[in-house]
Image (spheres, rainbow, N blue to C red):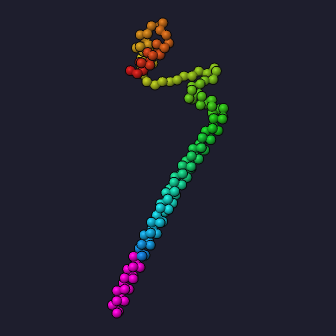
Amino acid sequence: MARRQLRFGRRRSSNRLLALIALVFIFTLTIAPPAKNYFTQRAQINALKSQLSADNSALQKAREELLLWQDPEFIKTQARERLHFVLPGERQYIVVEGENTEAQNGTTKIASALVDGQPWYARLIASISETGN
């Protein structure tokens, strides 16, 4: 009879182990989707935080530039630099480096071939077709 009790004890421990493994497996299946969702949402939150900080820095730069554009002196300097504006009574000189070519002389092949009585749109079409060459 002692042998039967030993066999029964082994079966009981293997049944307990099997039940424990089944419980861990079911617990894992139950917890896995919420855990995955949690980590996915944390990654999205971190990405949105970094995007928010980048947007805030861009907004700050835009506000600083807006303050610059409200200064009349800054507007004058930008008009002089970008649009080549001059104040009344001033002379502006633009220095161009390089060699003289046909385009810098003021006449081109097609423009010199046009008759003076041509309408303006004929000259426009000629200059556009010449720039394509």
Q: Quadrant of the N terminus?
A: bottom left
Frontmost residue, 124 versus 62: 124
Left or right side of 33 for 79: right
Left or right side of 63 for 26: left
Residue at screen point 60% across, 28% down: 79
Residue 16 part of the magenta-drawn span: yes
* Segment tinted magenta in the rendering: 1-18
Picture coordinates of residue 71, whole percent (x, y) = 66, 34
Frontmost residue, 55 versus 57: 55
Picture coordinates of residue 39, whole percent (x, y) = 49, 59
Question: Predominant secondary structure in magenta?
Answer: helix
Q: Is residue 70 above or below residue 30?
A: above
Outermost residue to the left: 3
Residue 7 in view in this figure: yes
Picture coordinates of residue 99, whole percent (x, y) = 42, 22
Q: Quadrant of the C terminus?
A: top left
Residue at screen point 56% across, 49% down: 52
Picture coordinates of residue 20, whole percent (x, y) = 43, 75
Left or right side of 127 for 87: right
Frontmost residue, 79 versus 89: 79
Residue at screen point 52% across, 52% down: 47
Q: Is residue 21 above or below residue 87?
A: below
Q: How many marks?
A: 0
Frontmost residue, 91 versus 57: 57
